[in-house]
Amino acid sequence: MSHDTDKLIRQLSLVAFLMAERRPITARDVKSNVEGYSEMSDEAFARRFYSDRAELIALGVPLHSQRDEFTGEELYTLKSDEYFLPQLELEDEELAALQTALYLLEGQFAYAEPLRLALQNLALGRPGFVDAPTEAARSVEVLDPDYSPEMPGRLAKLEGAISKQRTVKFDYWSISRDERSERTLNPYALLPDNGVWYVVGHDLDRDDIRTFRVSRIRGDIKFATRRERDFRTPADFDIEHYRGRPPWQVGAIVGEARIEVRGDTAWWVQRTYGDTGRLEDDVFITEYSSIPQLASWVLRQDGRAVPLEPDELRRDVATSLRRVRERHEGKPEVPAREKPQPRGEAAAERPAGPVAPERFAVLQALLAFLLAACGEDKDAEIRVSQLLERFPSIPPEELEEHLSLLNLVNFGGGCYTIYAELRDETVHVDKELWGDTFRMPPRLTPLEARAIRLALEYVGPMIAADAHTPLARVRKKLEETFGQFALSQTPQPQVEDEAEDLISKLARGVREHRVVEIEYQKETEPTPTVRTIEPYQLERRLPYWYVHAWDLGSDSEKSFRIDRMRSAKVTREKFSPRQQFEPTRLRDAGTALVLYTKEIARFETERGARLLADGAGIKDVSVGSYAWLESDILAKRGEAIVLEPAEVRRNIAARAKELAKELGVERMRVKV
């Protein structure tokens, strides 16, 4: 029997013994009665018992200890009402909506298996959990631009290091310096922010808290030591401090800027950046750590944001517009040849498996499922196919091993929980005397709770729409089941009430084939317009939501970003779905050839650009609107140059000159 299996039998039997006794017990009681401890020396027992307790507590098992005031011995208790899930008042529609979330996220969600196990526990005793996906699930697509075949394995390794508080080593590509170096990190938390995964922790080489983009980790992530624990996460560490910051506030704050927002842009600025600044009489006041990043945001607004203070911001905007104009006038430069990719580099890293639920948690859930299948009877038979469908994290070839392990879980004194035997394509279960103790589902582990929180963030508004229930109510019910542990290393889901309301209305339009009237402000327009649309599909392309629709005004396919909708109204008018309509964001896209200077080329390679021999980058950019491309080029501050089409080059040069006048910076002395 392996070391891991021995440990699991000890831990499950320890839980069983504590709940069976229903009284405070001593370490001596544990050593004498719990499977796996009795043969140990006192020294080995002390070490293993301490380690097992720490792991169980980290897994959300509410073990309590207190010192006996008379004997001085440590006493241990585990209350069954704290170990099991409380009676969860999730309506069937709400549970089905969570199942929809699992269906939507499958394939590009590294936490799919912990999410599945959490929902399995929530649904225990309810039929129909594995029914076909709802109609709403079929009308939504979820895409994660930061996802790669390597990402799930990296997240899994970091999750393990965070839960075990183990120091890790990895090679990291510092994109700003274009250098690879080994980093040694005490990882405190994983953070999804604006569609990108980061790990935050104490960088031991620099003795500072640092944030690393997970996609820039190269090669394997390895434990730095063989110890069972290397560090403790500081009690005052707050992951929310590292989240939701706009690019111009990443790093140490150095000042405060004032930017006038024109037209009807103020409502969008308030919705999008209200937590990172404030509006006073149509002036956006925001702290900043980077003038270039703030200038980039100003230029992206294409005249709807006017820099007022500080002068350094105005000068950067003036310099950037001069650079944009000069680099788009005359004939375009001839790019260097493409840099060949080193042979074998693309296959250097082996993709690893996604984040897997802890084996202890899988065994807990499996035990509860087998006993629930018995019900009030003493035995039950379950098809192997049904069991594997419910527990896909158990490989078929390991099912018998899992069952054998559960057969050894006991309450002390030779009293076991179940006897499960694999017979061809059937699992026969005999419930032992005290087996009913584990008929209820256990509380969610921190990893399972984290998976649910991420699901709420990724597709929460669709869960609410599918459940016909406000998301806040679903979330509150779920978080009441997370147990006694704190999820301090897991960010709160960020879902705006406005987004939830808009998506709920658009989802209704999709479901009922109803025309929807939206008030929409394009990124390149100063005021919103009213559009009448036939909605066909919702898409979550992190970090934004989109609706793909037929625009009745222009009689054409259109895609709309939901954060730029001021309102949506479901009308009484119904529509017949158009034949062969396949929603897509860029069906009739135009194409532009864009050159990126070596100052930003490395950043653009993460978005699909190809490196050139001189360090610059190049990309064929598909765009639904050349007006959008112009604002994007302006935001790059002259470090992105359109090579073709020629007409777009001329328009960008003219717009840069015109915009300098509109912003009142055309006469400013520019930086050289």
Image (cartoon, rainbow, N blue to C red):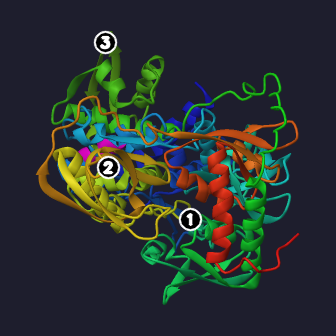
Label annotation for residue 425? 3
Q: Quadrant of the N terminus?
A: top right
Is residue 349 something one can see in this rendering? yes
Measure how far apart labels 1 and 2 are at the Cα level.
79 Å
Give the mark, 1 or 2, whose residue is nearer the N terminus.
Answer: 1
Label annotation for residue 73? 1
Report the amino acid beneath label 2.
Answer: Ser
Query: Residue at the location (75% across, 27% down)?
Result: 348
Q: Residue 420's quadrant in the figure?
A: top left
Is residue 609 something one can see in this rendering? no
Percent position of residue 85, x then y: 31, 53
Task: Give the residue at mark 2.
Answer: 554
Give the mark, 3 or 2, whose residue is nearer the N terminus.
Answer: 3
Give the mark, 3 or 1, whose residue is nearer the N terminus.
Answer: 1
Secondary structure, mark 3, is loop
Which is more toward the observer, 480 or 435? 480
**Region rendered in magenta:** 96-101
Query: Residue at the location (72% across, 52% down)?
Result: 640
Report the amino acid beneath label 1.
Answer: Glu
Measure how far apart labels 3 and 2 are at the Cα level.
59 Å
Q: Badge 2: few (under 14), some or many (20 or more) residues near its Cα, within 10 Å?
A: few
In this rendering, is residue 2 above or below 7?
above
Position of residue 200 in the picture relative to residue 466 (left or right):
right
Q: Quadrant of the C terminus?
A: bottom right
Name the magenta segment's main secondary structure: helix
In this rendering, is residue 313 above or below 410?
below
Position of residue 608 in the picture relative to residue 470 (left or right):
right
- Is residue 100 inside the magenta stretch? yes
Percent position of residue 161, x then y: 65, 48
Secondary structure, mark 1, is loop
Position of residue 95 in the picture relative to residue 612 (left or right):
left
